[in-house]
Image: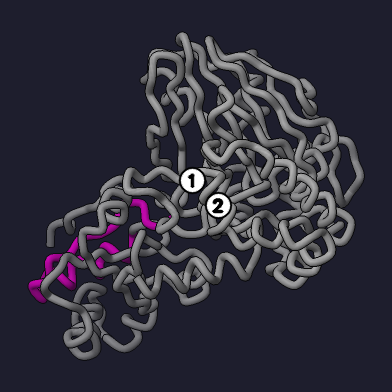
Amino acid sequence: MAQAPQWTVSDLDDRLESGRPFYLLDVRNRDEYEATPVEGRRPLPQRNVPYFEMLEAGGMEDLVDSVESYVRAELTAKIPRDMSVLAVCAKGDTSEFVARALLRLDYDAANLAGGTRAWGDHYRVTAVLRDDRLTLLQVSRPARGCLSHVLISDGRALVVDPARHAEQYVEIATAEGAVIERLIDTHGHADHISGGPALAEVLGVPYHLHPYDAIHPIDLVPGRLTYEALREGQEVTVGKVTVRALWAPGHTLGNLALLVDERFLLAGDTLFLASVARPDLGGRAETWAPLHHESLARLLELPDETRVLPGHFSSRSEADPDGVFAARLGDLRSSNEGLRQVGRGRDEFVRYILDSLPRFPDEYVEIKRVNMGLLIPDDEEARELETGKNLCALAQAAAAVEARAAGS
């Protein structure tokens, strides 16, 4: 039988963003499925049936025949026929057999080319602003909930919080007719590997970081990386636009927020749209939570019209109709539970934070070592470290977002 129709990860992303209906049949092992689900703006109709269970129950020598037998006996009444069905596995290989079996049974079926591995490496670029002074682009990594930003003015580009696949940012800048002249990490990331140091070395441009985050917070070992210090109040320019650093310790000791053109706050991992950052990833939650309160209180002194662009999202439902993850600071004052807690005083805020902490992912210690230049993984090791969605936000707020999405 010929190859099943293939969806690229861009096809999948467009479907998830537009809300056009389809059914997802995920044939990965249950632990993989639970750790890295495919999620859309709205709850996605889907089912997880591990591939090996299909083969064992089907009991035939030919793989497609075996899957077809299982689907006919167990899933015919459960998989809808009024929408496309996308078969998904880790690499796009075993799901190909599943898609072929579905086609034999007259489903409108397709296979996800490259599987969830390719999905984990997918990036989406959305314009936040285009005017005569500034082009501001938001780069999302949907599978991980990570956000980075590219600022372009007068043909010059600044990349903030670049992710591991650094070539993406060169392609983005080139497409905009710009040249990257500097990179900034708002903090030493724990949830993903930064592309900043490597890209800065390749391009021969400055890489900026607060010096407190050039030390591993748990190992207390200085990093082996080249950077230019960016501290409180310092400014960098991109063409006609000024970017001012605001030191906002809490998530990390060197955490920065960046005020762009007095209009946009690139909040990094200080403030998200549905929550605030956790302060325990350096192993010092009780010490850093009060600092976090002070930092958020300071950011709340900015004008209500300041548009907040976070470093992560918990759910695609947080995006606006244009697909941008952003909100007015004035709106977040009332909608963001973490910010409401700031107004209740330091002690109440600290209590809320410490009661809301999610599990501490062991791999985050290793990722920080990578970002400090203390550990150099190969591509497969890097991929394994980055498996799953980021866990940089508080548990209570993230759960609330999921509950709202499920009810919509």
Q: Amino acid at mark 2?
A: Leu
Mark drawn on residue 332: 2
Q: Residue at x 78, y 68 (%)?
A: 354
Query: Crowdedness of circle 1 by 10 Å Cα count: few (<14), some, many (20+)?
Result: many
Residue 392 seen in the figure: no
Residue 303 vertical position relative to residue 41 in the rendered view, above or below: above
Q: Nearer the viewer, residue 168 or 263?
A: 263
Residue holding disc 1: 327
Asked if 134 appears above or below 315 in the picture, the reply is above
Q: Nearer the viewer, residue 64 or 407?
A: 407
Q: Residue at x 39, y 14 (%)?
A: 132
Q: Quadrant of residue 349?
A: bottom right
Which residue lies most toward the right here? 220
**Quarter of the figure with the N terminus:** bottom left
User: Which mark sits nearer the N-terminus, 2 or 1?
Assistant: 1
**Image quadrant assignment for residue 337:** bottom right
Within 10 Å of disc 2 (Cα), the crowding (few <14, some 14-19, many 20+) is many
Judging depth in this view, the residue of 298 and 172 nearest the camera is: 298
Spot occupied by residue 405 in the image (x, y as percentages of width and height): 41, 68
The numbered mark at residue 238 is none
Above or below, comparing residue 359 to residue 113 in the picture: below
The type of residue carrying mark 1 is: Ala
Is residue 295 rendered to the left or right of residue 48? Answer: right
Q: Are marks 2 and 1 in contact (CB under 8 Å)?
A: yes
Magenta extent:
93-117
Residue at image coords 65%, 56%:
339
181 in the magenta segment: no
Q: Quadrant of the C terminus?
A: bottom left
Secondary element at image label 1: strand
The answer to whether residue 39 is left or right of residue 259 is left
